[in-house]
């Protein structure tokens, strides 16, 4: 089988048979999506890479039980978001023992705006995301960063649609306030 | 800016508004320059969020595969821990059953419901321990 052109289903079937190259191809295909979720939730940090790896390891272990009821992307996103939420809980416990990173000052934004976000712009966005509570952050990451619909976001997080909408609205309001100096305006 | 209109504005990005709500928002947007500007800012923020494209860096797939290959050793440790945990539970359960059995036997035969009675243990003082044959033997050796 030529893994590069094989469908996800074919790769999953081959991975179940123990074909490592098939599983590696699945990792390659979905690593960006998982990265978007995990880095959106945790920010750029060494733990993000670990959580990303753990996401795929959990998926590997669950290969036999994956029935394809949801798309592979949603399935991996669900694992990634749950692991990220666990990591945030661990981080909170640690930060209550040691110093907190919540009061970090706002990073410098890039002067020039490009179609593609600069590293500094991304830092500003991650900084603003980091100010949100984990529940709010999860809906923003899924709906606005990853582009899932509100229905899909509700399914992944296993919360009612109304909850997603209200969290989304409040989270955006909060982010607008946080980012007000960056946008150079007042609300 | 009215809070209700602002809420409606945020909702309009993600939810289908009723005809009445949509009309209300459209009318407010026509009237208020401030609300129009706010809509633009929200849209800009959402565009910025939507443009965030992240990656784990080079050789991520290789790192995952390396961890998967290293997994049997980790699994070995995990299974040792699991079997120890399981053995401990079984021993603890068996101990509890024995204790309950002895207590029941003592209660029926002597009417005594104490742990010391069930396990035939008595309180021992430090002097009694020191005067035990073992302590005497140790003294002789010295």
Image (spheres, rainbow, N blue to C red):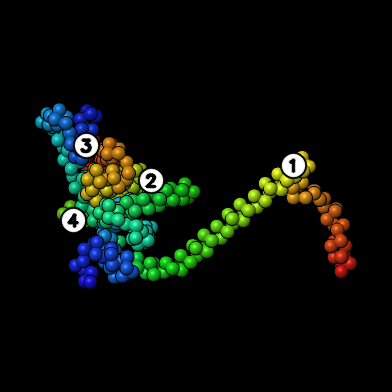
**Residue at x 16% of width, y 31% of height:** B18
Mark identifier at residue B108: 1
Subunit that carries the residue with mark 1: B
Badge 1 density bin: few <14, some 14–19, many ≥20, Cα 10 Å: few
Quadrant in which residue A150 is drawn: top left
**Residue at x 32% of width, y 57% of height:** A66
Same chain, marks 3 and 4? no
Mark identifier at residue A116: 4
Q: Are marks 1 and 2 in contact (CB under 8 Å)?
A: no
Badge 3 density bin: few <14, some 14–19, many ≥20, Cα 10 Å: many
Q: Identify which residue, B64 or A89, lies in the foreground.
A: B64
User: Can the viewer see residue A170 in this picture?
Assistant: no
Badge 2 density bin: few <14, some 14–19, many ≥20, Cα 10 Å: few
Mark identifier at residue A84: none
B24 in relation to B64, above or below: above
Q: Identify which residue, A117 or A49, lies in the foreground.
A: A49
The residue carrying mark 2 is: A103
The span from disc 3 to disc 2 (Cα, nearest Å) is 27 Å
The residue carrying mark 3 is: B10
Q: Identify which residue, A112 or A149, lies in the foreground.
A: A149
B41 in relation to A53, above or below: above
SS under mark 3: helix
SS under mark 4: loop
B27 in relation to B56, above or below: above
SS under mark 2: loop
């Amino acid at each position: 089988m030529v893994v590069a052109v094989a469908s996800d289903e074919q790769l999953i079937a081959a991975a179940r048979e123990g074909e490592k190259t098939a599983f590696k191809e699945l990792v390659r295909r979905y690593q960006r999506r998982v990265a978007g979720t995990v880095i959106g939730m945790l920010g750029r940090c060494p733990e993000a890479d670990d959580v990303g790896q753990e996401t795929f390891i959990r998926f590997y272990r669950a290969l036999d039980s994956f029935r394809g009821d949801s798309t592979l992307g949603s399935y991996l996103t669900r694992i990634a978001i749950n692991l990220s939420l666990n990591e945030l809980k661990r981080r909170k416990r640690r930060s209550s023992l040691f110093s907190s990173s919540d009061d970090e000052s706002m990073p410098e934004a890039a002067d020039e705006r490009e179609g593609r976000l600069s590293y500094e712009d991304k830092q500003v966005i991650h900084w603003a995301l980091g100010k949100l509570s984990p529940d709010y952050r999860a809906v923003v990451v899924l709906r606005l960063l990853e582009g899932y619909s509100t229905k899909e976001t509700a399914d992944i997080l296993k919360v009612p649609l109304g909850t997603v909408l209200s969290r989304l609205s409040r989270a955006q309001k909060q982010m607008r306030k946080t980012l007000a100096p960056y946008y150079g305006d007042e609300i | 800016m009215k809070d209700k209109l602002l809420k409606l504005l945020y909702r309009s990005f993600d939810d289908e508004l009723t005809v009445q709500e949509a009309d209300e928002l459209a009318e407010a947007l026509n009237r208020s320059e401030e609300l129009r500007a706010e809509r633009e800012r929200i849209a800009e923020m959402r565009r910025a969020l939507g443009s965030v494209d992240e990656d784990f860096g080079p050789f991520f797939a290789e790192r995952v595969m390396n961890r998967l290959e290293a997994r049997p050793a980790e699994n070995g440790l995990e299974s040792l821990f699991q079997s120890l945990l399981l053995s401990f539970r079984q021993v603890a359960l068996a101990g509890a059953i024995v204790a309950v059995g002895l207590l029941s036997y003592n209660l029926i035969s002597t009417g005594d419901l104490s742990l010391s009675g069930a396990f035939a243990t008595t309180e021992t003082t430090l002097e009694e321990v020191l005067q035990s044959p073992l302590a005497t033997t140790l003294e002789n050796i010295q």
